[in-house]
Image (cartoon, helix red, strand yellow):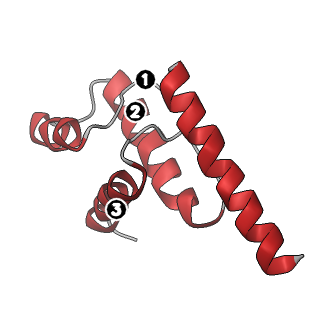
Amino acid sequence: TTERDEHEQLVEFKQKNDHCVIQGVSHDQDKSPGEWVANQRSNHKRDRVRPDQKRVLDKIGLTWKAEVTQKTDNMLWHQQHEKLVDFEWKHG
């Protein structure tokens, strides 16, 4: 995948979940954005993100630290629960 593809996946994640709190690598379809976000955070920490790239990611709403607030923690819990229920319904 290209940098553009990863950016588009992050935008889609934001549209679907209404946040950009991605905790590193998750599973299934969220794996790629999680890896990419982890790389962006690491690059940002080492001042390796260009200002134009940072502006784009800031505009999307990327959180530069992988901190989870109580609100996002609750959202993430409910999202994972929905995935589990969906998985159980599909696979028994």
Relative horizontal placement of residue 14, taking residue 89 as reference (left or right): left
Q: Quadrant of the N terminus?
A: bottom left
Q: Residue furthest bottom?
A: 90
On the image, the x and y values in percent for residue 28 come to 64, 65
How far apart marks 2 and 3 lie (CA) works out to 19 Å
N-term-proximal mark, 2 vs 3? 3
Q: Residues within 10 Å of mark 1 (few under 14, many from 20)?
A: some
On the image, the x and y values in percent for residue 43 come to 36, 33
Relative horizontal placement of residue 20, taking residue 76 as reference (left or right): left
Where residue 45 sits, quadrant-wise, is: top left
Query: Can residue 68 be seen in the rendering of this structure?
Result: no
Q: Please name the amino acid that badge 2 sits on.
A: Arg
Which element carries disc 1, helix, strand or loop?
loop
N-term-proximal mark, 3 vs 1? 3
Q: Nearer the viewer, mark 3 or mark 1?
A: 3
On the image, the x and y values in percent for residue 84 come to 75, 59
Query: Can residue 5 be seen in the rendering of this structure?
Result: yes
User: Which labelled disc corresponds to residue 65?
Assistant: 1
Q: Please name the amino acid that badge 3 sits on.
A: Glu
Disc 3: which residue: 12
CB under 8 Å between discs 3 and 1: no
Q: Nearer the viewer, mark 2 or mark 3?
A: 3
Residue nearest the viewer, comparing 91 with 44:
91
Which element carries disc 3, helix, strand or loop?
helix
